[in-house]
Every structure is written in structure tokens, then in C-alpha cells.
Amino acid sequence: MKLLKIAYLRWTIPFLLFTVVAIFLWHSLHRDPHVVPSPLINKPLPHFQAPVLGIHSQRMTEQDFQGHVSLFNVFATWCLSCRTEHLVLMDIARSHAVTIYGLNYKDDHRLVLAWLKTYGNPYQQVIEDPRGDLGIDLGVYGTPETFIIDSHGIIRYKYVGPLSSSVWQNILLPQVRYWQAFLK
């Protein structure tokens, strides 16, 4: 009887471990890496006061996001994915579908000014965040990341990774339209 119990455990324990690992892997493989849960979703933007790119005497705060739905795009000149995404942001800006604000993350303002002059500026305003303090408050993992902010300054959606035309059309634009209609 004892021998039977040992043989049973010899096969049961590895089977259970295999099952747990398989479930974990299956779940990981079927999760969208661009959808990162954020504790800030449905919460107000954190309080901040940061300089506007190129106009250091002017400051932007979370209050500037109120009154309209906006995209808040975290980018940097050293980010290769941000260059690809920039073309999409230019198209979005030309469509006038939503106001776009930028958060320049851990970058040199001179490089950013040159970059925007070369590639175009889709942003209503760009906030400088050279040390990454606001990025930390927003839970930024890296660049690029894009937030949808409603007209009350509430973070409604976070997309991690570079935007593509498909992501804009199928994910972000429907969200933007929803919040624009919902909060009229």
C-alpha cells in the first residue's frame, strides 16, 4: 500500500507542476503585451508642474488637460520606435481628431527641438521631463507610451509601444471617440 502511494505521488506531483507551468505559459502567450494594467486607469493625472519645451518660463499642469479629450504621448529622441510612431502621430494631428500633448522623457531639450524641426511637430505642447520624474508618477515603463486623457483630466487608457495606423484606427480612435461623445 505504501509503495502504491509513493508511485502515485511520483507521477502526480510532476503532472501537477507541468499543468501549472503550461497554464502560466498559455496565459502569457495569449496576453497582448501592449495592454499593461495600470493602477492609474480611471484616476486623475498626477499633480505636476513642468516646463514647456522651448518656453521654460511657461509651465504646464494637469489642469491643461481639462476641457477636451487628449492623447498624452511619452517619447524621446533616443527611442527608435518613437521615430516610426512619429509618422502616425503626424497623421493624427493632421486629422484634428484629438489634441496631442507630448512628454519628452529623459532627453536633452536641444535634441528634441531639432528632432521636431526635422520630422514635424504633432504636439499642441511638449512637456520636458529630463529626469523622468513625471514619467515615474505616470508609471511609464519606457518609450513610447500613449495615454488617453478625458476632458476631466482622468486617465482612461494606456497603450505601451509604438502606435501604428492600425492601432490608431482600431484601438485608440474608438476610445477617443467614446470619451468625446460620453463627456459632451
Image (cartoon, rainbow, N blue to C red):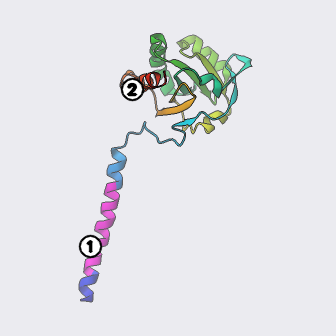
Can I make out residue 88 in this image? yes
Question: Could you say which disc has been placed on residue 150 in the image?
Answer: none
| Gap between marks 1 and 2 measured at Cα | 46 Å
| Residue at the disc numbered 2 | 167
Measuring from the top left, give residue 176's x and y in whole percent: 45, 24
Which mark's residue is nearer the viewer, 1 or 2?
A: 2
Q: Residue at x 54, y 12 (%)?
A: 120
Q: Residue at x 34, y 52 (%)?
A: 25
- Vertical comparison of 134 with 126: above or below: below
Q: With 40 as the anchor, is 181 left or right in this view? A: left
Residue at the extreme front of the image, as rendered: 184
Magenta stretch: includes residue 113: no
Magenta stretch, residue numbers: 7-23
- Vertical comparison of 23 with 33: above or below: below
Q: Residue at x 31, y 69 (%)?
A: 14
Q: With 142 as the anchor, is 128 left or right in this view? A: right
Can I make out residue 132 in this image? no
Label the magenta part by its dominant secondary structure. Answer: helix
Measuring from the top left, give residue 108's x and y in whole percent: 67, 24
Packing grade of label 2 (10 A; few <14, some 14-19, many >=20) is few
Q: Residue at x 49, y 14 (%)?
A: 93
Q: With 109 as the anchor, is 139 left or right in this view? A: left
Amino acid type, residue under disc 2 in the picture: Val
| Residue at the disc numbered 1 | 11
Residue at the extreme right of the image, as rendered: 57
Packing grade of label 1 (10 A; few <14, some 14-19, many >=20) is few
Element marked by disc 1: helix
